Amino acid sequence: MERAENISIAAWPRTSARQRPRVSAKAFAAILIGSAIVSAAMASWLPLQMSIATVFLFAGPHNWFEARYFLMRLPARFGRSRNFFIVAFAGIGTLTLAYVSLPVMYYANVWSGANWSNAIAVWNTAMVLWIGALVLMRARQRRNGDWFWVLPIAFALCAANWLSPEMFSLAIVYVHPLVALWFLDRHLRRTKPEWLSTYRRCLMFLPLLVAGMLWQLSRTSQLADDNGLFWRITQHAGAELLPNISSHMLVSTHVFLEMLHYGVWIIALPLIGATGAIWNVKTIPIASHSRGFPKLIAAILIFSLFVVAALWAGFSVNYAATRDIYFTVAIAHVLAEAPFLLRMI
Amino acid sequence: MKRTLLSIAAVGALLASGIYSFGDIARPKPSPAEGKVIFYSGLSVTSDPKAYEARLQISQETLKRLQEAAAREGGTSSLSQSIMHSSTRTMMAGMFMFLAISFAGVWLARSNQKRNTKAVAAVLAIAFMFGLATVMVRANAGPPGYIRWQNLPQSLKDGKETAGGVQIELVPGDQNMKLIIPLRPKREGE
């Protein structure tokens, strides 16, 4: 039987990508830094407007690209990774269902919202323990080094979460966009190792850029969240949890990180050939394998395009409500990143 | 032996009398009901030599937000307040801290000596990060509010305006409105 590990590595278009060095490492760095500076400037200048525009334009497409990327990373036969993927998919399904059901129960008057903090803390704990379990399972597969340190860190994170569940959830909101940069790092390491050192040097520029933003925006006045949509955006960025911090600074920082996230998934990874030709399902192992499901995968991708179009339509009709629904359901893609990132480590 | 028994009996009698005497202590007075912070806003304090009454000016928008916040009866309680008022969360946090420290100990014991040094350094670094994060959260990642109010007495004398943050707190009862300014007494030499 073909090993799952071999299949997933074979899916990387390493040779073709390396044979066509259309962009030099310096040009790559210039594009990265230039994009980051422009994103930071735009996010600082017009935070609310950029938040609305970027979510409208890129939220759906970036999920589509991410789904396609994950399908490409999914082995046709799980082999030794069977248990890993069972735990991964069970966790994604259960945690997403639980996350979506909380606001649904609240709006359906089934639950009063009492003990909301505890409910959030339980969900966060389940997520941390799930990721911890996946890390240990992955470690057992790789058999390199002692990964036992994951447990104390996971428990410490759980403790921090119980001390302040809302703050922990806010941390996830800010950390999640950065995971895309980790994906790009792992992908460059395998497909374009000559760019990796340049990329990592560029990453060192990111904290400086964020620090500059924070310094510039720390004394700005609060954003006028006088309508429902602006209020939602400032709340999402943590304005209620951190009332002494300028909401302008919070929204700008969050929008900047989101723009980086979208940029990696929609522009950087497809451009370096991480997803292959996006219309070609043959680059997806589960479709190209002799016992694969090409029609099913093609149908899923085409259906997903319709979902993206429906999301745009929803944003056009009622932006605020669609944004709420999107950010609730989108927790699935946040969770899905964990197992697929672990597969690349 | 007899002396020992007598000593034990004497100590026992003393302890028993202590129980009786302490058992008669009055119950502690219930602590006064605490206020609840429901809203955070800005406040400017200024003097008006022509005015006869103190005036409190509130913009329509602020009043609206204040009413909404009061209606929600929510607001942002501090981290320590929220933890103190939730025994479940405190217990869970304590349990996970216990597990984290226990498993960290097991891991350190399993690791070899060379790694231990690195591990201890990593743990210290993480602890430092947590400490720093705690300081930031407790301080709400900004300068303490009282700094803005330090020049209030002098500004009032000079007829200047002083502005700073203010927490709107709902307190039980029917007493007058009270403005509490966080003024720190200046030390000699300052």
Image (spheres, coloured by chain):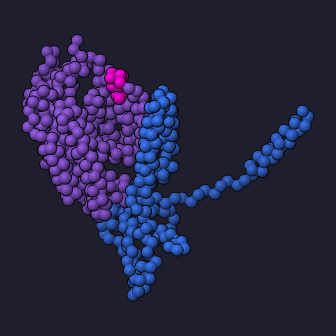
Q: x%, y% of residue A211?
A: 30, 54
Could one spot residue A72 in this view of the protein?
A: yes
Could one spot residue A314 in this view of the protein?
A: no
Asked if residue A31 is positioned above or below residue A212 in the image, the reply reads above
Q: x%, y% of residue A285?
A: 16, 22
Q: Which residue is drawn at 17% across and 25% down?
A: A11
Q: Which of A94 and B170 is in front in this view?
A: A94
Query: Does the magenta segment cover residue A142?
Result: yes
Q: Which of A24 and A230 is in front in this view?
A: A24
Q: Which residue is drawn at 39% across and 28% down?
A: A147
Q: Which residue is drawn at 17% across and 45% down?
A: A29
Q: x%, y% of residue A284?
A: 15, 25
Asked if residue A323 is positioned above or below residue B35 in the image, the reply reads above
* Horizontal relation, residue A269 to residue B60: left or right: left
Count of number-bearing discs: 0
What secondary structure predominates along the stretch shown in magenta?
helix
Residue at the far right: name it. B2
* Horizontal relation, residue A68 to residue A20: left or right: right
Query: Does the magenta segment cover residue B41?
Result: no
Q: What stretch is highlighted in magenta?
A: A134-144
* Horizontal relation, residue A338 to residue B181: left or right: left
Residue at the far top: name it. A1
Quadrant of the frame with the C terminus of chain A = top left
User: Which chain has been coloured purple in this picture?
Assistant: A
Q: x%, y% of residue A258?
A: 23, 46
Quadrant of the frame with the N terminus of chain A = top left
* Horizontal relation, residue A290 to residue A201: left or right: left
Q: Quadrant of residue B156?
A: bottom left
Q: In which quarter of the image is residue A168?
A: top left
Q: Which of B89 and A206 is in front in this view?
A: A206
User: Which chain has been coloured blue in this picture?
Assistant: B
Q: Residue at x 44, y 59 (%)?
A: B37
